């Protein structure tokens, strides 16, 4: 039997709703597709699906499809048959017979392997590489992706028939920014855990300022990013005071920050692979059904003498400030309404005001 998974931590309505869906889907002997941004806990949900299912006493195998080349992934999943006297190898589908296999990052699988996967998902039959006879197994398939797979089908990057087979049940995990009620409980959990690992007698928690900064952050890396931030800051606090007697704060979010930070003079534009483009966070547009539409803010052009010196961060700050001023103007300087027009929480908007030194 596989090791028991950690218990999920969350009390927000969005997360509790997902856990209810997991319980319903677990009892069905059908594929499940888990969709969610990076760091949202897709493997945790996959293991929960397995251990709530009738297969809970059988094997649970995880394969990160992004960790292999196409040929190596074929061997990893289905094994390889040799004609030169070497001993044949069995793949993960063979070893998962009777249990569950979790295919993470399913969107990176090549079209050739997607076709091969169809037979394994639909009928439990496959051929090992180099072999011409089929093997048959009883494996439940759970797959996960961080991209919009229906859009990938439209682009021709993913097979529609394989998506149909995988998507018997689709669980879309909420990002951490949609789980505000879970941020502080998760932070407390991660802090207590690393404090115990370092030998501290107790964990003092966070100052009110630190807690507010945790709630205001967008967490594009979701729970994984939160865990890293909490662990770094708790360790830093413990090194300064091994008794951990005082609440932790203020927090450092950027581990690269410092007076001697290395920076490119002109950072190159990132190259985005088509398979990962859809996993990037999208800045939401203002709500369409508002009484007064929010006018688009156009960044004023830099003067010629400023062009050579203005950094990317400076331009972003000017753009943010313009959005804030515009939202406040059309909202009659009402901060709550301005936050709504920018699709931000009130605490997030207040954080932006402090960031830009606006005492409103």
Image (spheres, helix red, strand yellow):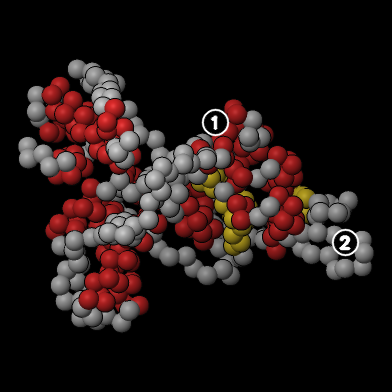
Q: Residues within 10 Å of mark 2 (few under 14, many from 20)?
A: few
Which residue does the image show at 76% across and 63% down from the upper left? 90
Furthest toward the right, the residue is 84
Counting from the top left corner in percent of width and height, residue 291 is at 19, 17
What is the secondary structure assignment of the residue under circle 1?
helix
Decide which of tag 1 and tag 2 comes sooner along the chain.
Answer: 2
Residue 119 in view (yes/no): no
In the rendered view, tell whether residue 2 sits above or below residue 325: below
Which residue does the image show at 18% across and 44% down from the upper left? 355
Give me the C-alpha separation between circle 1 and circle 2. Answer: 39 Å
Residue 308 in view (yes/no): yes
Counting from the top left corner in percent of width and height, residue 278 is at 49, 37
**Which residue is at the front of the view, 181 or 246?**
246
What is the secondary structure assignment of the residue under circle 2?
loop
In the rendered view, tell whether residue 150 sits above or below residue 103: above
In the rendered view, tell whether residue 302 sits above or below residue 177: above
**Residue on which the image places disc 1:** 151
Instruction: Please give left or right for residue 1 compared with residue 176 in the image.
Output: right
Instruction: Please give left or right for residue 255 compared with residue 168 in the image.
Output: left
Looking at the rendered image, the quarter that the C terminus falls into is: top left
**Residue on which the image places disc 2:** 82
**Which residue is at the front of the view, 285 or 124?**
285
Which residue does the image show at 12% across and 33% down from the upper left? 335
């Amino acid at each position: 039997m596989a090791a028991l998974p950690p218990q999920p931590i969350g009390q927000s309505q969005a997360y509790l709703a997902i856990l209810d869906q997991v319980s319903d889907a677990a009892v069905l002997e059908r594929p499940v597709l888990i969709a969610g941004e990076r760091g949202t806990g897709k493997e945790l949900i996959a293991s929960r699906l397995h251990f709530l299912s009738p297969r809970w006493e059988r094997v649970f195998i995880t394969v990160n499809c992004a960790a292999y080349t196409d040929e190596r992934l074929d061997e990893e999943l289905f094994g390889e048959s040799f004609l030169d006297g070497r001993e044949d190898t069995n793949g993960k589908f063979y070893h998962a017979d009777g249990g569950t296999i979790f295919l993470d990052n399913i969107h990176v699988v090549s079209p050739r392997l997607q076709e091969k996967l169809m037979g394994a998902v639909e009928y439990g039959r496959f051929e090992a590489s180099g072999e011409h006879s089929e093997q048959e197994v009883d494996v439940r398939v759970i797959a996960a992706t961080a991209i919009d797979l229906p859009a990938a089908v439209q682009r021709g990057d993913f097979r529609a028939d394989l998506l149909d087979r995988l998507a018997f049940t689709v669980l879309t995990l909420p990002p951490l920014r949609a789980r505000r009620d879970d941020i502080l409980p998760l932070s407390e959990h991660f802090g207590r855990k690393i404090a115990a690992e370092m030998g501290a007698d107790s964990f003092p928690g966070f100052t009110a300022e630190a807690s507010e900064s945790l709630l205001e952050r967008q967490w594009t890396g979701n729970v994984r990013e939160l865990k890293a931030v909490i662990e770094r800051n708790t360790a830093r606090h413990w090194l300064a005071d091994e008794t951990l007697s005082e609440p932790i704060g203020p927090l450092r979010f950027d581990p690269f920050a410092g007076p001697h930070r290395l920076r490119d003079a002109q950072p190159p534009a990132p190259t985005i692979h088509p398979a990962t483009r859809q996993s990037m966070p999208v800045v939401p547009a203002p709500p369409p059904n508002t009484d007064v539409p929010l006018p688009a803010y156009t960044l004023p052009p830099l003067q010629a003498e400023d062009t050579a010196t203005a950094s990317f961060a400076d331009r972003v700050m000017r753009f943010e400030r313009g959005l804030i001023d515009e939202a406040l103007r059309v909202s009659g300087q009402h901060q709550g309404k301005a936050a709504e027009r920018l699709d931000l929480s009130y605490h997030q908007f207040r954080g932006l005001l402090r960031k830009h030194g606006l005492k409103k």
